[in-house]
Image: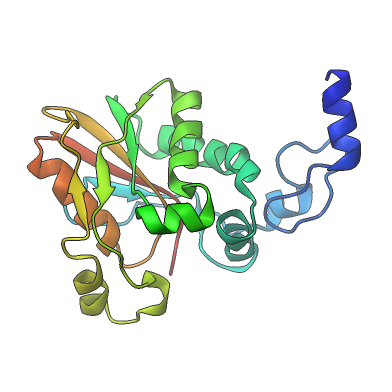
Protein backbone atom coordinates (compact mmCIF):
# COMPACT_ATOMS: atom_id res chain seq x y z
CA UNK A 1 0.00 0.00 0.00
CA UNK A 2 1.35 3.46 -0.89
CA UNK A 3 1.72 6.39 1.50
CA UNK A 4 -1.57 7.98 0.42
CA UNK A 5 -3.40 4.72 1.03
CA UNK A 6 -1.85 4.37 4.49
CA UNK A 7 -2.87 7.90 5.42
CA UNK A 8 -6.43 7.35 4.21
CA UNK A 9 -6.66 4.12 6.22
CA UNK A 10 -5.56 6.00 9.33
CA UNK A 11 -8.08 8.81 8.78
CA UNK A 12 -10.89 6.62 7.44
CA UNK A 13 -10.24 3.03 8.53
CA UNK A 14 -12.06 0.41 6.44
CA UNK A 15 -15.22 -0.88 8.06
CA UNK A 16 -17.32 -3.97 7.59
CA UNK A 17 -20.17 -3.08 5.21
CA UNK A 18 -22.66 -5.09 7.28
CA UNK A 19 -21.97 -4.32 10.94
CA UNK A 20 -19.83 -1.18 10.62
CA UNK A 21 -16.98 -2.49 12.77
CA UNK A 22 -13.46 -1.29 11.90
CA UNK A 23 -11.68 -4.16 10.17
CA UNK A 24 -8.61 -5.77 11.67
CA UNK A 25 -5.42 -5.69 9.59
CA UNK A 26 -5.91 -9.34 8.60
CA UNK A 27 -9.57 -8.93 7.65
CA UNK A 28 -10.41 -8.09 4.05
CA UNK A 29 -13.74 -6.76 2.82
CA UNK A 30 -15.84 -7.77 5.80
CA UNK A 31 -15.24 -8.79 9.39
CA UNK A 32 -14.80 -12.46 10.29
CA UNK A 33 -17.90 -12.36 12.50
CA UNK A 34 -20.17 -11.34 9.62
CA UNK A 35 -18.42 -13.78 7.30
CA UNK A 36 -19.63 -16.57 9.58
CA UNK A 37 -23.02 -15.23 10.68
CA UNK A 38 -24.52 -13.59 7.59
CA UNK A 39 -27.69 -15.25 6.24
CA UNK A 40 -26.10 -16.91 3.21
CA UNK A 41 -28.66 -18.05 0.69
CA UNK A 42 -28.36 -21.66 -0.43
CA UNK A 43 -30.20 -23.59 -3.13
CA UNK A 44 -31.99 -22.62 -6.30
CA UNK A 45 -32.56 -19.07 -7.45
CA UNK A 46 -35.84 -17.18 -7.44
CA UNK A 47 -38.30 -17.54 -10.30
CA UNK A 48 -38.82 -14.17 -11.98
CA UNK A 49 -40.93 -13.74 -15.10
CA UNK A 50 -38.91 -12.95 -18.26
CA UNK A 51 -35.72 -14.11 -16.49
CA UNK A 52 -34.25 -17.58 -16.69
CA UNK A 53 -33.59 -17.24 -12.96
CA UNK A 54 -32.58 -14.66 -10.36
CA UNK A 55 -29.62 -15.54 -8.13
CA UNK A 56 -28.49 -13.83 -4.92
CA UNK A 57 -25.80 -14.65 -2.35
CA UNK A 58 -27.69 -13.41 0.73
CA UNK A 59 -31.09 -13.18 2.39
CA UNK A 60 -32.26 -9.62 2.98
CA UNK A 61 -32.36 -9.58 6.79
CA UNK A 62 -30.40 -8.60 9.91
CA UNK A 63 -26.92 -7.30 9.04
CA UNK A 64 -27.61 -7.46 5.31
CA UNK A 65 -30.56 -5.10 5.71
CA UNK A 66 -28.44 -2.69 7.78
CA UNK A 67 -25.60 -2.89 5.29
CA UNK A 68 -27.86 -2.17 2.34
CA UNK A 69 -29.39 0.85 4.07
CA UNK A 70 -25.90 2.22 4.70
CA UNK A 71 -24.88 1.53 1.11
CA UNK A 72 -27.94 3.17 -0.43
CA UNK A 73 -28.89 5.99 1.93
CA UNK A 74 -25.88 6.89 4.08
CA UNK A 75 -23.21 7.46 1.45
CA UNK A 76 -21.71 3.98 1.65
CA UNK A 77 -20.96 3.68 -2.06
CA UNK A 78 -17.40 2.51 -1.37
CA UNK A 79 -18.91 -0.76 -0.15
CA UNK A 80 -19.80 -1.63 -3.74
CA UNK A 81 -16.38 -3.26 -4.06
CA UNK A 82 -17.17 -5.89 -1.45
CA UNK A 83 -20.87 -6.28 -2.25
CA UNK A 84 -20.14 -6.63 -5.96
CA UNK A 85 -17.52 -9.28 -5.20
CA UNK A 86 -20.13 -11.39 -3.40
CA UNK A 87 -22.46 -11.01 -6.38
CA UNK A 88 -19.77 -11.96 -8.90
CA UNK A 89 -18.93 -15.07 -6.90
CA UNK A 90 -22.62 -15.96 -6.71
CA UNK A 91 -23.03 -15.57 -10.47
CA UNK A 92 -20.08 -17.87 -11.07
CA UNK A 93 -21.28 -20.47 -8.56
CA UNK A 94 -25.00 -20.49 -9.40
CA UNK A 95 -24.91 -19.72 -13.12
CA UNK A 96 -21.84 -20.98 -14.89
CA UNK A 97 -23.09 -20.50 -18.45
CA UNK A 98 -21.49 -17.78 -20.63
CA UNK A 99 -23.17 -14.37 -20.81
CA UNK A 100 -22.58 -11.46 -23.17
CA UNK A 101 -23.00 -8.33 -21.05
CA UNK A 102 -24.20 -6.79 -17.80
CA UNK A 103 -26.77 -4.06 -17.30
CA UNK A 104 -28.67 -2.72 -14.29
CA UNK A 105 -32.02 -1.47 -13.02
CA UNK A 106 -31.57 2.32 -13.19
CA UNK A 107 -32.71 5.04 -10.83
CA UNK A 108 -34.91 7.85 -12.07
CA UNK A 109 -33.14 11.10 -12.96
CA UNK A 110 -34.64 12.81 -9.92
CA UNK A 111 -33.58 10.14 -7.44
CA UNK A 112 -30.11 10.00 -8.98
CA UNK A 113 -29.71 13.76 -8.43
CA UNK A 114 -30.82 13.46 -4.81
CA UNK A 115 -28.69 10.42 -3.96
CA UNK A 116 -25.68 11.31 -6.06
CA UNK A 117 -25.00 7.78 -7.29
CA UNK A 118 -26.87 4.79 -8.68
CA UNK A 119 -26.26 1.88 -6.30
CA UNK A 120 -27.16 -0.81 -8.86
CA UNK A 121 -24.87 0.71 -11.49
CA UNK A 122 -21.93 0.60 -9.06
CA UNK A 123 -22.66 -3.06 -8.31
CA UNK A 124 -22.90 -3.84 -12.03
CA UNK A 125 -19.56 -2.13 -12.70
CA UNK A 126 -17.89 -4.15 -9.96
CA UNK A 127 -19.35 -7.42 -11.22
CA UNK A 128 -18.21 -6.51 -14.73
CA UNK A 129 -14.71 -5.72 -13.48
CA UNK A 130 -14.46 -9.15 -11.82
CA UNK A 131 -16.07 -11.22 -14.57
CA UNK A 132 -14.68 -9.43 -17.60
CA UNK A 133 -18.18 -8.86 -19.00
CA UNK A 134 -18.97 -5.54 -20.65
CA UNK A 135 -21.27 -3.28 -18.60
CA UNK A 136 -23.73 -1.40 -20.79
CA UNK A 137 -26.56 1.05 -19.99
CA UNK A 138 -29.64 -0.40 -21.69
CA UNK A 139 -32.58 0.83 -19.59
CA UNK A 140 -33.98 4.13 -18.39
CA UNK A 141 -36.58 4.92 -15.78
CA UNK A 142 -39.20 7.06 -17.47
CA UNK A 143 -41.42 7.86 -14.50
CA UNK A 144 -41.13 8.07 -10.72
CA UNK A 145 -42.56 5.24 -8.62
CA UNK A 146 -43.35 4.74 -4.98
CA UNK A 147 -40.76 2.88 -2.91
CA UNK A 148 -41.39 -0.83 -3.53
CA UNK A 149 -40.36 -1.86 -0.01
CA UNK A 150 -43.35 0.07 1.39
CA UNK A 151 -45.88 -1.79 -0.75
CA UNK A 152 -47.07 -5.15 0.53
CA UNK A 153 -49.37 -6.67 -2.11
CA UNK A 154 -47.68 -8.24 -5.13
CA UNK A 155 -50.37 -6.89 -7.46
CA UNK A 156 -49.77 -3.36 -6.14
CA UNK A 157 -46.02 -3.76 -6.62
CA UNK A 158 -46.54 -4.77 -10.24
CA UNK A 159 -48.88 -1.85 -10.84
CA UNK A 160 -46.38 0.54 -9.23
CA UNK A 161 -43.61 -0.29 -11.75
CA UNK A 162 -45.77 -1.01 -14.80
CA UNK A 163 -44.47 1.11 -17.67
CA UNK A 164 -41.86 2.75 -15.43
CA UNK A 165 -38.88 1.48 -17.44
CA UNK A 166 -38.01 1.54 -21.12
CA UNK A 167 -35.22 0.38 -23.39
CA UNK A 168 -32.83 3.17 -24.39
CA UNK A 169 -32.90 4.09 -28.05
CA UNK A 170 -29.17 3.39 -28.25
CA UNK A 171 -29.38 -0.02 -26.57
CA UNK A 172 -28.42 -3.05 -28.66
CA UNK A 173 -29.38 -6.30 -26.93
CA UNK A 174 -30.49 -8.25 -30.02
CA UNK A 175 -29.57 -11.91 -29.54
CA UNK A 176 -27.56 -11.21 -26.37
CA UNK A 177 -27.52 -13.03 -23.05
CA UNK A 178 -27.80 -10.28 -20.44
CA UNK A 179 -27.11 -10.20 -16.69
CA UNK A 180 -29.57 -7.76 -15.08
CA UNK A 181 -28.29 -6.33 -11.77
CA UNK A 182 -30.31 -4.85 -8.91
CA UNK A 183 -29.61 -4.51 -5.20
CA UNK A 184 -32.51 -6.50 -3.66
CA UNK A 185 -35.27 -8.68 -5.10
CA UNK A 186 -38.52 -8.92 -3.15
CA UNK A 187 -41.55 -9.83 -5.23
CA UNK A 188 -39.53 -9.60 -8.44
CA UNK A 189 -41.84 -7.00 -10.02
CA UNK A 190 -39.08 -4.51 -10.84
CA UNK A 191 -36.84 -7.16 -12.37
CA UNK A 192 -39.80 -8.53 -14.33
CA UNK A 193 -40.55 -5.12 -15.80
CA UNK A 194 -36.93 -4.50 -16.78
CA UNK A 195 -36.38 -8.02 -18.09
CA UNK A 196 -39.51 -7.67 -20.22
CA UNK A 197 -38.04 -4.52 -21.81
CA UNK A 198 -34.82 -6.39 -22.59
CA UNK A 199 -36.62 -9.40 -24.04
CA UNK A 200 -38.87 -7.21 -26.19
CA UNK A 201 -35.70 -5.50 -27.39
CA UNK A 202 -34.44 -8.83 -28.67
CA UNK A 203 -32.36 -10.18 -25.77
CA UNK A 204 -32.02 -13.95 -26.06
CA UNK A 205 -31.77 -14.52 -22.31
CA UNK A 206 -31.87 -12.50 -19.09
CA UNK A 207 -30.38 -13.60 -15.76
CA UNK A 208 -31.29 -11.59 -12.67
CA UNK A 209 -28.48 -10.94 -10.16
CA UNK A 210 -29.01 -9.18 -6.83
CA UNK A 211 -27.07 -8.92 -3.62
CA UNK A 212 -29.99 -10.13 -1.52
CA UNK A 213 -33.42 -11.70 -1.71
CA UNK A 214 -36.23 -10.80 0.68
CA UNK A 215 -38.03 -13.73 2.27
Q: Quadrant of residue 134?
A: top left
Q: Quarter of the image containing the N terminus?
A: top right
Look at 19% across and 73% down and name the residue there: 159
Q: Position of residue 185 (x, y in %)?
A: 38, 59
Is residue 215 visible in the rendered image? The answer is yes
- Of residues 25 and 136, which is closer to you in this image? 136
- Residue at x 49% of width, y 25% of height: 129
Return the x and y of residue 83 as percentages of the image width and height. Answer: 57, 44
Q: Is residue 25 visible?
A: no
In the image, residue 132 sits, relative to residue 10, either above or below, namely above
Tell me: residue 197, above or below residue 91. Answer: below
Q: How many marks?
A: 0
> Which quadrant of the view contains residue 8?
top right
Q: Nearer the viewer, residue 119 or 44?
A: 119
Above/below status of 201 relative to 131: below
Task: Write the residue at 23% across / 51% down.
Answer: 194
Amino acid sequence: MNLVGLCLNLLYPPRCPFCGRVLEAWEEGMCSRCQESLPWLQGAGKTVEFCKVCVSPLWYQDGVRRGMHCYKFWGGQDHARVLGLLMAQCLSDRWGEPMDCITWVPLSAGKLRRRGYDQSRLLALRVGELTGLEVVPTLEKVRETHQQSRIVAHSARRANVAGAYALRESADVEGKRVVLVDDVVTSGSTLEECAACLRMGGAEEVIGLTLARAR
